[in-house]
Image (tube, rainbow, N blue to C red):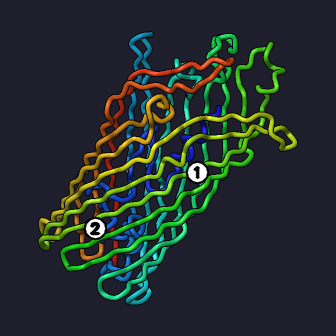
Amino acid sequence: MRKLLSLTLLALAGSTAFAGGYRVSIQGQKQLAMGHTGVAVVNSAEVAFFNPAGMAYLDKKFNLSFGANALFAKTKFQNSQYNWEATTENMGTPFSLYATYKVTNWLTAGLAVYTPYGSSVEWDQDWQGAHLVNNIDLQAIFVQPSVSIRVGEHFSVGGGPIFATGSVNFNRNVAINPLLSVGGSGTDVTLDAQGITAWGYTAGFMFNPSKKVRFGMNYRSEIIMEARKGDATFNDVPGFASASPTLQNTTFNADLPLPAELTVGMSYKPSEKWLFAFDYNRAMWSVYQALTVDFLNPDGSIRNTSNNPRNYKSSSTYRIGSQYIANDKFTFRAGWYFDESPVQDGYFAPETPRNDSMGFTGGLTYKVNDKLGIDFSFLYLHFDEVDNSYDHYQENGNTLPFGGTYKSVVFSPGIGITYGF
């Protein structure tokens, strides 16, 4: 129960995406194909997300980019000591929409709408880790209006507010104890929170010392998500426990911090055909030490409080990408990134089986005419196999670790359009 919102709000984190429990960055077809670089790249309206300051350098007065992906995620769990095996396979459809408009030679306005995740986690009901999670379904949309101001020929600044709205539906068994079951089905709780909203902001700059080199920086603020009076519904409660106050349907509150992120990078254009880019991202996950959830009485007072230790550490992502303009019709892209996990040993849960990963990306653009292009991208995300556990689950005063070996993989094809005039 108390582990619900840790995953919920991680999934809503600004420039990242948790799909099927994985951190998958999918915020633009062109930039995804280039290893998800973009803080110092001006390719299309996608720059409204990666670094709003870059909108000032788009050539066309109006620019539009729209894209969507099919995201397939699979995780296999195994504990050889007890001969446990489980698998979760999920699909999601994250999308993004970006538009920019050059108001004057020095002022450009933009709008970014995107989903920072696009899937779910669904283990078998009553599996060995059911006391941590059975299934979870996350939905979120971020809306980000922004402006870019050009200061002279070589420097620009940009930024704007971020509005996040989302919902979550989560189910887990309330205990390992087999007595808390009906007909072999463990007593479980479904937590449902709708209309979760929060505000943050993004700001950045771009510096172009020459026609070949660009530098960029983008900062995305910490966001506090406030879940208020979500519904907690208990199922398969045995008769002897039906009067227990802790197993009565109720509501819950929680305040959750999403970490700030800083991205810096550069791009280099040695010729008219080639472009290379490098980004470094630092996510300040160390702010996320524990999650406190208050379960409420009908009058709104606190019935009981649970505290879920997370002890995350700040983590880094390293990205590189390249682009090659083959001719007037075709542009090809490729990239790679390494993403460090913020999860420390002993805090590894099946809600977010997040370990270090490497992303391999590629794609192309087919230019239909001077105004319209069709973008294709592909991401293969390989997670290091990890043998780890969550050591902080308590039942009847006892700490009961749960762990094993996790093998995870994600792949995602995408398509989009770019339009401008």
Left or right, residue 100 beside residue 413: right
Left or right, residue 198 beside residue 243: left
* Whole-percent x, y for residue 72 in the image: 38, 39
Front one among 399 and 194: 399
* Whole-percent x, y for residue 297 in the image: 83, 38
User: Total label count?
Assistant: 2
Label 1 close to label 2 by CB (< 8 Å): no
* Whole-percent x, y for residue 90 in the image: 44, 35
Counting residues from the start of the chain, the first of labels 1 and 2 encountered is 1
Front one among 257 and 311: 311
Task: Assign the C terminus to one quadrant of the image.
Answer: bottom left
- The kind of secondary structure element at disc 1 is strand
Q: Which mark is residue 373?
A: 2
Q: Which residue in the rendered view is the most extreme toward the right?
A: 299
| Residue at the spot 23% in from the left edge and 57% down from the top edge | 321
Residue 304 occupies which quadrant of the picture?
top right
| Residue at the spot 47% in from the left edge and 52% down from the top edge | 284
Q: Which mark is residue 257?
A: 1
